[in-house]
């Protein structure tokens, strides 16, 4: 009976400890040593013994660091695998996997970090990216077990179809996320798999290039004797972009921060984000001691579109069956169907759209449209910009709008025309009045405003002048020119939340208020300034502290003294899948992101505000 009571008592204690363990968070003492305790208290359950520690994941695994050594532990503090046996453990390319390094020597002197001699893909990680020479790299699953054993000199980011490029004994190979080998380690150069589903690889021994598909098949083999592949990248110019090596610069490491761990790197590889299903290839041969270079063009399936025998020295992206190209320093239009070359004036020509090309001089002026024979088919303009399926044109200080075939839609007499959004052009006429026209030049919103924004999701912020004053008061209208928010506020900031609803803040008497769309009531926010950015609305309170709103939700309270810190913190939150932070969490993380912080240990005591992470 006594043993049973003791057993039950022990189980109760274990249950209680397990329950508490669920709420364990990393905490540090005043000397900067990390352990784990119950959130909201200062009681350590796992004693402080590390220089840094990360939260436990859903499998009860956490990453810890002591000095220059990293390890994995469970919620009792017991080591998973080798105890502090890693040179580095960090997150991997936005996945649940961890990138780990075994062995190697940490190098603090940037001049002693080995530099890469061969061509490599964007996003390559490993001993040549982190300041650790000679380490072996692999991946660990969230449960602490190996996904890929640490045996590679480098591991790339995940590419399409979960492929990875790895380096083994100085040569590159392609494997999948399960470690299956698709291409043996024979190559000294590889590009990432682009969004057209192909990658280029170079055999180190033969120095010949091949083109492979995302499913591991050879599209263009070494038998084509290609000395270099290029890719059409730019939508409008389609210029050739070579694949070249990256360079490693000084890495100032901060613990576990992706944007700090990765060194600053320069890449001139442009094999990513092509919108054109064509690949250009260069073939180089020696004839009577002369180097002969020939350009050919293939489609993504490996079919030859422009043969090497066409004699082209340079070509832009084919469009509507025509490629702007050069032969013997003469610009012309190469017809990929008839295989004929039509010489034209040596100007710049954009790819064809609706049978015409936009042409302009080498001085970036004198714009006009030409047909496939090089004949001018429009008026001359000082500047032209593509806006959806129209051209905004400029002569002198005036703007107008023409179709892709050169027909005038809006006369060239406006003071301003902005690119279309929601199919609507924001226009300031020759009197300075502001309104909106559709792509056919019809008035959508009368010219009755002093200024306005582009339409977004059917709404635009507009302003009107106060009679007898230089001040303007702002509000919001819809596409029917109906007043959504009256033009009676000093400044209006608006956004669309995750549910597609309009969220509005208005400035009145120097303070921003949340505007209730149903009853027009104002709720003070405490913000004295708000500005829209690409990632959200930056807020500022009367104390000069900054925060961030995304959609309608305040995800970073006004707690940081520098506006630039908001962007860094938000990037960190995205990388670590953190939805929102408290004021103390924002300040704590900001300390970690501070590049002036000591690399491996705190050099000062931390105040009470920063206790829990």
Image (cartoon, rainbow, N blue to C red):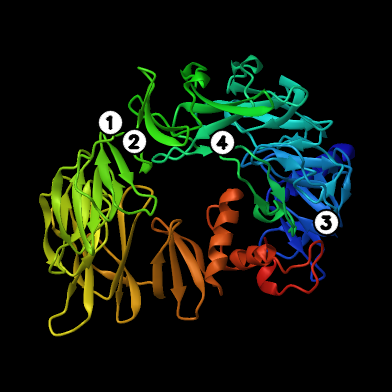
Say if mark 1 contacts mark 2, CB within 8 Å: yes
Specify whether residue 411 is in view. Answer: yes
Specify whether residue 75 is in view. Answer: no
Say if mark 1 contacts mark 3, CB within 8 Å: no
CA gap, disc 1 to disc 2? 7 Å
Residues 271 and 94: in front is 271
Where 587 falls versus 287 (above or below)? below
CA gap, disc 4 to disc 2? 30 Å
Residue pointed to by mark 2: 344
Q: Return the x and y of residue 234 as percentages of the image width and height.
A: 45, 40
Where 328 falls versus 258 (above or below)? above
CA gap, disc 3 to disc 2? 51 Å
Give the number of the disc on residue 271.
Answer: 4
**Residue farthest to the front?**
288
CA gap, disc 1 to disc 4? 32 Å
Image quadrant in which the N terminus is located: top right
Residue pointed to by mark 3: 111
Give the number of the disc on residue 373.
Answer: 1
Q: Return the x and y of residue 373 as percentages of the image width and height.
A: 28, 31
Image quadrant in which the C terminus is located: bottom right
Q: Secondary structure at mark 3?
A: helix
How crowded pointer 1 is (Cα within 10 Å; few <14, some 14-19, many 20+) is rated as: few
CA gap, disc 1 to disc 3? 56 Å
Q: Return the x and y of residue 392 as percentages of the image width and height.
A: 25, 51
Query: Nearer the viewer's eye, disc 4 or disc 2?
Result: 2
Mark closer to the chain start, 1 or 4? 4
Give the number of the disc on residue 99.
Answer: none
Q: Secondary structure at mark 1?
A: loop
């Amino acid at each position: 009976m006594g043993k049973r009571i003791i057993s039950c008592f022990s189980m109760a204690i274990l249950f209680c400890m397990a329950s508490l363990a669920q709420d364990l968070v990393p905490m540090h003492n005043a000397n900067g040593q990390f352990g784990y305790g119950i959130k909201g208290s200062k009681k350590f359950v796992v004693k402080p013994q590390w220089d840094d520690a990360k939260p436990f994941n859903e499998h009860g695994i956490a990453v810890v660091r002591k000095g220059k050594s990293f390890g994995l532990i469970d919620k009792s503090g017991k080591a998973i695998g080798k105890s502090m046996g890693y040179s580095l453990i960090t997150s991997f390319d936005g996945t649940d996997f961890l990138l780990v390094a075994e062995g190697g020597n940490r190098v603090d002197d940037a001049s002693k970090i080995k530099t890469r001699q061969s061509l490599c893909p964007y996003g390559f990680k490993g001993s040549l990216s982190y300041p650790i020479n000679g380490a072996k790299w692999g991946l660990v699953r969230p449960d602490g077990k190996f996904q890929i054993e640490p045996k590679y000199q480098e591991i790339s980011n995940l590419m399409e179809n979960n492929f990875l490029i790895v380096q083994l004994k100085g040569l590159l190979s392609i494997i999948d996320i399960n470690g299956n080998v698709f291409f043996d380690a024979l190559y000294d150069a590889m590009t990432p798999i682009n969004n057209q589903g192909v990658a280029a690889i170079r055999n180190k021994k033969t120095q010949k290039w091949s083109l492979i598909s995302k499913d591991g098949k050879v599209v263009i083999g070494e038998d084509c004797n290609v000395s270099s592949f290029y890719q059409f990248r730019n939508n409008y110019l389609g210029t050739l972009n070579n694949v070249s090596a990256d360079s490693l610069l000084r890495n100032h490491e901060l613990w576990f921060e992706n944007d700090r761990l990765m060194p600053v790197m320069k890449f001139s590889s442009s094999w990513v984000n092509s919108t054109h299903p064509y690949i250009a290839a260069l073939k180089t041969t020696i004839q009577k001691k002369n180097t002969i270079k020939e350009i050919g063009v293939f489609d993504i399936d490996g079919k030859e579109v422009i043969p090497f025998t066409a004699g082209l020295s340079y070509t832009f992206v084919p469009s509507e069956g025509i490629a702007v190209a050069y032969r013997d320093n003469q610009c012309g239009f190469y017809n990929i169907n008839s295989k004929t070359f039509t010489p034209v004036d040596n100007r710049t020509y954009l790819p064809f759209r609706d049978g015409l090309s936009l042409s302009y001089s080498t001085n970036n002026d004198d714009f006009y449209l030409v047909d496939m024979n090089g004949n001018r088919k429009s008026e001359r303009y000082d500047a032209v910009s593509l806006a959806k399926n129209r051209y905004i044109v400029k002569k002198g200080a005036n703007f107008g709008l023409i179709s892709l075939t050169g027909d005038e839609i809006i006369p060239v007499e406006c003071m301003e025309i902005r690119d279309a959004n929601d199919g609507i052009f924001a226009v300031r006429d020759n009197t300075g009045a502001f309104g909106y026209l559709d792509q056919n030049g019809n008035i959508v919103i009368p010219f009755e405003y002093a200024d306005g924004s582009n339409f977004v999701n059917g709404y635009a912020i507009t302003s009107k002048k106060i009679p007898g004053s230089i001040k303007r008061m702002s509000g919001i209208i819809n596409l029917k020119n109906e007043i959504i928010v009256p033009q009676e506020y000093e400044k209006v900031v608006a956004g669309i939340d995750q549910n597609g609803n309009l969220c509005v803040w208005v400035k009145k008497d120097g303070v921003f208020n949340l505007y209730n769309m149903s009853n027009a009531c104002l709720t003070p926010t405490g913000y004295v300034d708000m500005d829209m950015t690409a990632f959200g609305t930056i807020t500022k309170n009367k104390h000069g502290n900054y925060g961030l709103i995304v959609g309608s939700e305040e995800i970073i309270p006004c707690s940081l003294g520098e506006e630039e810190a908001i962007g860094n913190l938000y990037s960190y939150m995205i990388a670590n899948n953190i939805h929102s932070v408290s004021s103390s969490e924002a300040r704590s993380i900001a300390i970690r992101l501070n590049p002036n912080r000591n690399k491996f240990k705190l050099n000062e005591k931390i105040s009470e505000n920063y206790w829990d992470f």
